Image (cartoon, coloured by chain):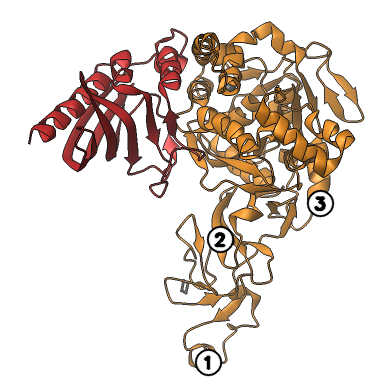
Chain colours: A orange, B red
Amino acid sequence: MLKERNPDLSRYVEPDRVRKEVYTDAEIFEREMERIHETVWIYCGHESQVPKAGDYCAVQIGRQPMIMVRGKDRKVNVLYNRCPHRGNMIVGDRKGNTGEQFRCSYHAWTFHHDGKLKNIPMMESGYAGTRYGKDNPDCSMKKAARVESYRGFVFASLSSSGPSLKDFLGKSIVAFDDMCDRAPGGEVEVVPNCFRVIQHSNWKLFMENQIDALHPSVTHQSTGRAAHEVEKILAKNAKGGEALSYHMLSAFATVTIDKWDNFQTINYPHGHCILTGYMGLRPQDPDTKAYDKVMIKAYGRKRFEEIVGVNIHHVLVYPGLSVQSPLQQLRAVRPLGVDRTLTEIWHFRLKGAPEAIYRRSLAYYNLVNSPATLINADDLENFWKCHTGLSSDGGDWVSFGRHHGRDIEEKGVVSSGPNMGTSEAPMRNQMKAWAKYMKEETRTP
Amino acid sequence: MKAQYDVEQFLYKQSELLDTKNWQGWIDLFAPDGIYWMPPDASYETWDGQPAIFAEDKNLMTVRMLRVLHPDAWSQRPLWETNHVVSNVSILKASKNGDVEVRSRFHMMELRRDDVRHFAGSYFHKLKKTKSGYAIKLQRVDMTNAQAAYDYVLQVWV
Ligand code: FES
Ligand SMILES: [Fe+2]
């Protein structure tokens, strides 16, 4: 536990291991919300979630309830979901359209879509001569310090200083390029309704698991084997149509633990990571051929080959986003407490691509990411078991020693060594970024 | 009256198969092209081409069954039990050939380790009359809390 008032948390992180309190201590959680989630760029949502003026979605950034809303000027604003009068939340729903203005349900103060005070009932008689009124910024809804979007993906930072979104993302920006480039028009749109799943563990266990190449064949064996059985029967009956989604599932068993060393992780500053590994999305069926045709028409053959040849399995944008760009889906992490984490899982449609391509990734979205998931259920079980185990006195450290000392580092970019895809380099890299963030407060109001 | 009785008996049997973990028996209730569907939102009108909590044909049901029965399905090993109650059964449409469309309501209590959860909602069944009784063409399951954040996921059919 935290005995000192201001402990140097970097002492909790060694190059190849981390103290258990980093996952289980409630005070550390509060501090990481301040210094990490409520400071850096956090994903809010996609612009297509709020197409019309007044459309809004509720978003959690760290511990802060926020609103992402489209203004009449088409701008997407991110505001604190809090009334400047007496603190009431402005919206209670997760999404909707607020019309011309926000209207507080308590005493009817109204606000423009950018949060500016519009009116107060009987403002003149009630406030003349006081310090309250339209000229006082304290009477408007507070805005996120910074909002930027990249290719339709909206991020906010609650700190007015710090790197720009592009600098923050660095190479991990490929997540959004790879996703959008796969659309003939270079754009994606959100598929309405995300899946929301709660895990009983610290949020970092999720981030570590997403690029953990060591676990799939162990954790997800049962589904891999089951899908493989059915896949064999289907192949015998030579139907073949559904083959791809079965194949994605059976890969969890057929790609055995030793083969995962063929994958590679590339780790970047700020804790971001790319897990390479081609997802085999280029079968030669009529649907793929039709898609290729539209893409070649849009981009030319050379650029098309580049786009569909991108070698990505997952991109992790630390601390809160995991993107599977070749399948157009992402998971946003919303920490609820030191031992509870919500993930929102979204699917996107490639604008202008044939319906069959959408359906292909939809199948994966449903099978892997729905609340009835055949895959994540076993991850969730591990998360809970990990968190419970870490809360015990059975040991003080979490080990990240696999292939430690064999990473290849060049200009701040750390790659797992050749044929060492199961290296725990991504966890070491995340914790390095974590320790740096936790060392000092960098948030400015 | 006869159809009402037969439909009710059929729904009771389905619940019993689930609660006794007779997965193959449950899958066998479906017609060869039958679909089990749980939409994430009540406004959805088709299972096809949209996000779904479940949208399974018999092949996918078989994957799910084999997975749950696999000894290394880690999350499925601890004790869990369910108890379904089906009621409010009303036949919405009855065709001359004996096919029916039925709405009913369910309540399911689930025990997992020491935790109890409750799920409730409505079923919509399209049942085809066959020589050996009804076969399910479509089973739509609308959970009252379909849009809720799931505190742990569902692993078998509701
Ligand atoms: S609290 Fe919002 S108007 Fe009073
Ligand atoms: Fe996993």
Image quadrant in which the C terminus of chain A is located = bottom right
The one nearer the camera, A62 or A25, is A62
Where is residue A424 drawn, in percent x and y?
72, 18
Q: Is residue B40 above or below residue A225?
A: below
Sequence-wise, the earlier of marks 3 and 1 is 1
CA gap, disc 3 and disc 1: 42 Å
Where is residue A236 drawn, in percent x and y?
53, 8
CA gap, disc 1 and disc 2: 30 Å
Image quadrant in which the N terminus of chain A is located = top right
Q: In this view, does B96 lie above or below A115?
A: above
Numbered circle sitting on residue A56: 2
Q: Which residue is drawn at 19% across and 34% down?
A: B86
Q: Are marks 1 and 2 in contact (CB under 8 Å)?
A: no
CA gap, disc 2 and disc 3: 24 Å
Where is residue A55 drawn, in percent x and y?
56, 63
The one nearer the camera, A298 or A215, is A298
Look at label 3 and name its amino acid. Ser
**Would you call the spot at circle 1 few (<14 residues within 10 Å), some (14-19), or many (20 or more)?**
few
**Would you call the spot at circle 3 few (<14 residues within 10 Å), some (14-19), or many (20 or more)?**
some
